[in-house]
Image: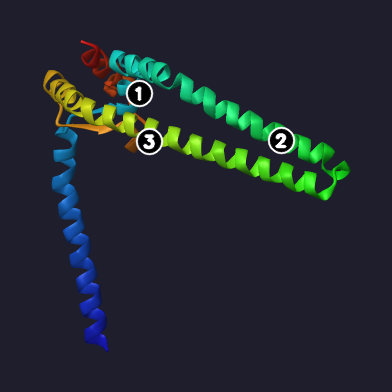
Amino acid sequence: MVGLKETVKSLSGMRALAVFSVLLFAVPAMAETRIGVVDLRQALFSSDDARAFSDQLEQDFAGTEEEVRKAQQEARTLQERLQQDGAMMNESEREQLKAEFQEKAQEFSRKKQQLDQTLNSRKQAFLEDARPEVDAAVKELMEEHDLDIILPSETVVYVKPELNLTDALLEKLNQ
């Protein structure tokens, strides 16, 4: 029993020594690492290309968005009529109105879903097209600021303002 306790204590001491050794060599290496931080989403979606893309989407889908709003309003009107007047209607009128409401609600849901899917696929295509330009701009920032690593701002709790390179990235994307 005594041998086991001494072995456990010895292993614990060896673990502590190993951790201490790793930290001893890692801290100087970390102190030399130069780090920058960027908010990729903010830079990309604030860029001139993204604004032009957004304007184009609004133009392309203005009619479709109006159809979706119209279907939603028609469904809402039918629902309100059903709630207000449903008690005074006979059974067949109420059932007919319910069926109309359900049809309009389904039409709204279908149109909204189609619009959302189309918009999402167009946005995804934009992001994929922009990716090489963003990557190149980030690499330029690394070289210009002599950085070892650039982290996305979502992974950082706090960053000194001088280490936040989002504005510089936005400038590069707008060139």
Q: Single out the residue that lies furthest toward the front.
A: 92
The residue where tag 2 is placed is 78
Q: Residue at x 27, y 89 (%)?
A: 1
Q: Of the numbered discs in the image, which one, if any, rests on residue 42?
A: 1
Q: Residue at x 59, y 26 (%)?
A: 70
Query: What separation in Å lies between label 2 and label 3 (alpha carbons)?
Result: 49 Å
Q: Position of residue 80 (x, y in %)?
A: 75, 35
Disc 1 packing (10 Å; few <14; some 14–19; many ≥20): some
Task: State the SS at label 2.
Answer: helix
The residue where tag 3 is placed is 157
Q: Position of residue 28 (x, y in %)?
A: 15, 39
Instruction: Give the left or right position of residue 89, taking residue 122 as reference.
Output: right
Q: Quadrant of residue 43?
A: top left
Figure check: 15 above or below 154: below
Which amino acid, by three-letter code, is at mark 1?
A: Gln
Q: Residue at x 41, y 16 (%)?
A: 59
Q: Single out the residue that lies furthest toward the right.
A: 88
Disc 2 packing (10 Å; few <14; some 14–19; many ≥20): many
Q: Mark 1 or mark 2: which comes first in sequence?
A: 1
Which is nearer the eye, 92 or 51?
92
Q: Position of residue 62 (x, y in %)?
A: 46, 19
Which is nearer the eye, 164 or 25?
164
Between marks 1 and 2 in the image, the one whose residue lies nearer the viewer = 2
Which amino acid, by three-letter code, is at mark 2?
A: Leu
Figure check: 119 above or below 14: above
Tell me how the rendering is colored. Answer: rainbow
Disc 3 packing (10 Å; few <14; some 14–19; many ≥20): few
Which amino acid, by three-letter code, is at mark 3?
A: Val
Which is nearer the eye, 141 or 34?
141
Q: Position of residue 125 (x, y in %)?
A: 27, 31
